[in-house]
Image (cartoon, rainbow, N blue to C red):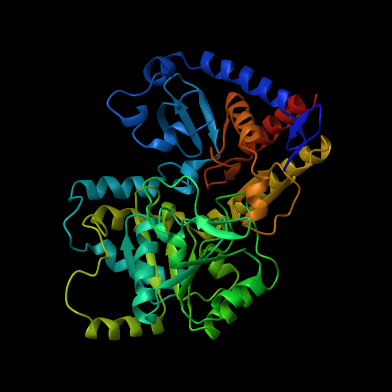
Amino acid sequence: MQASDSTTRSIGGIDVARIAELRETEARTFRKARPKSEAKVGNGMAGFLGGVPMHWMTDWPTPFPILVDGAKGATITDIDGNRLDDFCLGDTGSMLGHSPAPVARAIRRQAARGLTYMLPSEDALAIGPLLQQRFGLPYWQIATTATDANRFALRVARAVTGREKILVFNGCYHGSVDETMVRLIDGKPVNRPGLAGEFRDLTRATRIVEFNDIAALEAALGERDVACVITEPVLTNSCMVLPEPGFHDALRRLTRAAGTLLLIDETHTISTGPGGYTRKYGLEPDLFVLGKPVAGGVPASIWGMSEEVAARYGAYNRTKEPGYSGMGTTLSANPLQFAAMHATLEEVMTEEAYAHMDRLARRLDAGLTAVIDRYKLPWHVARVGARVEFICAPGPLKNGGEAEKAHTPELEAAIHVALVNRGVLIAPFHNMMLISPATTAAQVSRLITAFGAVAARLTA
């Protein structure tokens, strides 16, 4: 939360002048350590719009992007030879570590057999039952990104219910699915600020309420015209917001009463356990989506549906006009995805791996909290399984509106660069850290020590 008075202004309890000083000195340190990278990318990469292959590469708070030479396990090395303990892990894409050995072997094996041919391979025979066993739903499809999977699942929801509207929670994130790009500002639903080229009023077909607000949810579903509620079990892409006791039970009860389907997007909360938040806490979604780490870093996603939804969708397909469904992309469900996903589900996403991840995440949570307490910072730490986040505001947060106000971009950017200079990489857009099966206790200790050193600088 930002606070100010007539003489000084503070962000997250830290004077803005001190934040600016930290950012400036750490930027100089960053540049000095990376002369090769600055020469190659400091003025942008030739041929790319904005100087980068993907625009968000310039959104990192470092003076220029880190030019990676290689990554293995939970470590990234740049072309200047700087080694970083990686807690960003591709913002969950490499949550299971960079190039897990079983996945690397599967990719090499499949590369010699063809990369895509619009037909299944033997790996696909194993994946279907693995998905059923792990996530509980009986019917599955493969896509390339969680965005794709969410789009397709929402199409199914609209098809089987005959309803147009969906419902999301303020502060949600479901990739670049257009109709989820809405926000509550001063209590009014609006298109999410900053959308490029969006000419539609997305709120026409999307209802939005605050997370954890059961009364608002009940009212929004009361007209019985919402096809689907799409939500993460925990809000993760703003400042992390955990569900309050009873919220998920109410969400399931109210959606069923309204004839509305429930889509659980586990793309970030798969950090909870091998079956995600859904299996650990006994959620009962009609539709389920998981992207990012499900193939160990190879672009892939999955979406599943219940027996009832599958039956209703089958009936719908028998009566609809023939033609392209608007779902599916040519490179989805390719044999490289099958090979990597088979290895990931069977050999990497194990109970033992998650036990290790959870143990170190608890240690990280406690260590960061101890630093916050030691320096009397008005901050807090939130965690869902192996996913940990320090938030530069008091907590816990109740909803997306509070999360938006708790976001402190200037302070977070300064902390991020300072941590990089101390050998630690965290997520660039918020203070998220992931523990992988390859992460070591020594790496966690170094992160806690680095965080303590930065806190000392900010509060000296």
Q: Is residue 437 above or below residue 29?
A: below
Q: Is residue 136 visible?
A: no
Q: Quadrant of residue 40?
A: top left
Q: Residue at x 16, y 56 (%)?
A: 117
User: Can you say which quadrant of the picture contains the N terminus?
Assistant: top right
Q: Is residue 315 visible?
A: yes
Q: Position of residue 111 (x, y in %)?
A: 22, 46
User: Can you say which quadrant of the picture contains the C terminus?
Assistant: top right
- Count numbered badges in the picture: 0
Q: Position of residue 176 (x, y in %)?
A: 41, 53
Q: Residue at x 61, y 36 (%)?
A: 409
Direction from residue 107 to residue 184 in the image, left or right: right
Direction from residue 258 to residue 460 in the image, left or right: right
Q: Residue at x 54, y 40 (%)?
A: 429
Q: Is residue 49 above or below residue 172?
A: above
Direction from residue 320 to residue 274 in the image, left or right: right
Q: Position of residue 357 (x, y in %)?
A: 59, 51
Q: Nearer the viewer, residue 457 or 275?
A: 457
Q: Quadrant of residue 30?
A: top right
Q: Is residue 401 above or below residue 166?
A: above
Q: Position of residue 87 (x, y in %)?
A: 55, 40
Q: Residue at x 74, y 27 (%)?
A: 458
